[in-house]
Structures are given as C-alpha cells and as structure tokens.
Amino acid sequence: MTESVRVIDTSARPWGDWHPEFPGTVSKELHFDADTGANLRQAYVPPGFTIAEKERHHHGNTREGVFILFGNIPYHEYDLPTTTEGRAFNFRKGFLLDRTPRSIHGISLDPTSELGCMILEWGTGPLEFNYIPFEGDLESFGTDFNPPHTADSAALPWAPHPQLEGCKIKVLSDGGATPDPRFHPVCLVHIPPGWSPKNTVHRGATKPQRRWLYILHGDAPVWTYAGADAATGTRHDLKEGCYLEWSAPSTLGFESGETAEIGCVALCVGTNLGD
C-alpha cells in the first residue's frame, strides 16, 4: 500500500546512476509509482556535459516537468518533426519546463553546459525516449505534437497568496488548456520569517492525487493530518533540500506557535500549500 505521507531529506540520500542515455550523470529517485510509472528525481549533470545525440525525442503521453535548481543546460525545443532548426534555450537556475505530451526536444551539442546543473525532473508516466531523426521523411511523423511551456521564475513578480495571508506566490504554470491535477499548479510559495496562519490552524483539503513540495532554501514547519477529521497532526521541520509528498486521506496544514526562523521558498506541484 502506498504511504499517504513521505518526507525525504535529499541531502542524506546517496547518488546513483541516472539514465543510460546520459553517461556521467547521477540522480536520486524521490518518487516512483509502479502502477502508473509516475516518477520524480533529483538529477545532476556535470560541467561540459554533452552527448552525441543525432536524434530528438519526446515522451509519448507523459507530461514532463523540469525545474533547474542551479547551473545551466542548453536545450533545443521543436514544434514539429519538420522543424529541424528548433528554438535554442539555455535553461538556468529558476527555469521551469512544463512539457505537454509529445513535446519534441533534445540536448544541444554546442555549447555544452558551462556550469553543470542540478534539476528536479518529474513525469505523469514513464519517460520513454521516442526518437525522431533530423533527416528523411519527416512529414510521415504527422503533426500531433505540442510545444512546451517555459517560465523564468526570476522574471516573474511575487503576488499575495490567495489563502495564506502574509505569504507570497509565483504561479509558474497553471496547465493552460490542459491542466492536470497531479501536475498543476506549479508554483513557488514564499513563507516569511515568523509567519503563522491567521487562524490557529490552516488545513488544506483532502485530494486523491499526490501533491508535493521541495524546499529551495530556508526552513518551515508544516503539519500533516491523517484525515479530514484528525484532531491533531504531525509536525515536519523542513529545511533546504527537503521533499514532502502527501495524498488522500492525508492533508497538509499550518499551525500557530513555533514559526520558521528564516522563512522559506518552496517549489510546489499540484498545490499552492493553502488549498
């Protein structure tokens, strides 16, 4: 049976090999659902990384998310198989890629990653590599492909949080025309030092899909509750690099009393922490 609450201090997890397509890279698996193939990992790409990729790829019906924790990674994105030049991006710290199913992309061969990079990568299903060449009968692949959504969080303004008074939020992706409750919203939430909820307890709703957060920097105490009617919750003192996921029957909330010493910024997926 899948646990309804999981907390991981990623700094305490060992690194292992990442994908065989990317030699020299390492990763830490944070989530894997054997039934659906949904997955999440923290991955590291070393400086100067490149591969002899002569084809582009997409991930079939899986929606892929990537958030750059630090460093940079050059990529090309392609609207269609017949778009052979593509759009060049140098994704860097704070960038989000929300790749809808059948979004074509490929690692750039030149330039390589100057700094290396650390990322969070997640998918609603298996991240299969379905390859598309640059030459040949490209029209035969059809036109059933989708462009990705990208967001530079550093360029977006903070807004007042709609449910957590005194906190701030940046919505990086709401899913557009095809939102997925397992995936959206993708947002950053800032909890300031010394913050407490307006009421003694602020508890979010119970939802069936898995939701998760990752502390980008700072610290924050949060509580999880075993069910909608649970009288008390379990406190989690989260710090930079901590990952927390929860799903029904559990819910997440905040309580007054002890507060964050320095505050935090959290990447949140499927939740804004107040819903």
Image: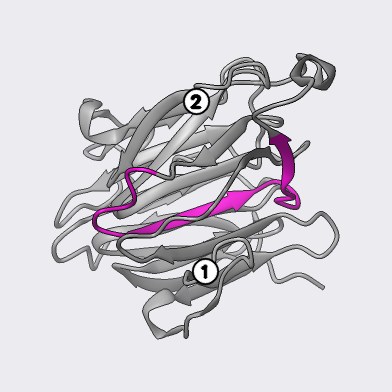
The answer to whether 82 is drawn above or below residue 206 in the figure is above
Amino acid type for the residue under numbered disc 1: Thr
How is the model colour-coded?
Answer: one colour
**What residue appears at the point 71 percent right and 30 percent down from the top-left corner?**
102
Instruction: Name the side, left or right, on which 60 lies relative to 160.
Output: right
The answer to whether 221 is drawn above or below residue 110 in the figure is below
Residue extending farthest to the front is: 136
What kind of element bears circle 2?
strand
Tell me the magenta residue range: 110-132
**What residue appears at the point 47 percent right and 85 percent down from the top-left corner?**
14
* Residue 234 position in % (x across, y down): 49, 73
Q: Give the mark, 2 or 1, whose residue is nearer the N terminus.
A: 2
* Residue 195 position in % (x across, y down): 20, 52
Query: Foreground: 73 or 94?
Result: 73
The residues tagged by marks 2 and 1 sit, at their Cα atoms, a distance apart of: 40 Å
Query: Foreground: 51 or 34?
Result: 51
Amino acid type for the residue under numbered disc 2: His
* Residue 110 position in % (x across, y down): 36, 43
Query: Foreground: 123 or 212?
Result: 123
Q: Which residue is mark 2?
A: 149
- 257 drawn magenta: no
- Residue 17 placement: quadrant: bottom right
Q: Which residue is mark 1?
A: 232
Q: Is residue 185 visible?
A: no
**What residue appears at the point 37 percent right and 79 percent down from the top-left corner?**
11
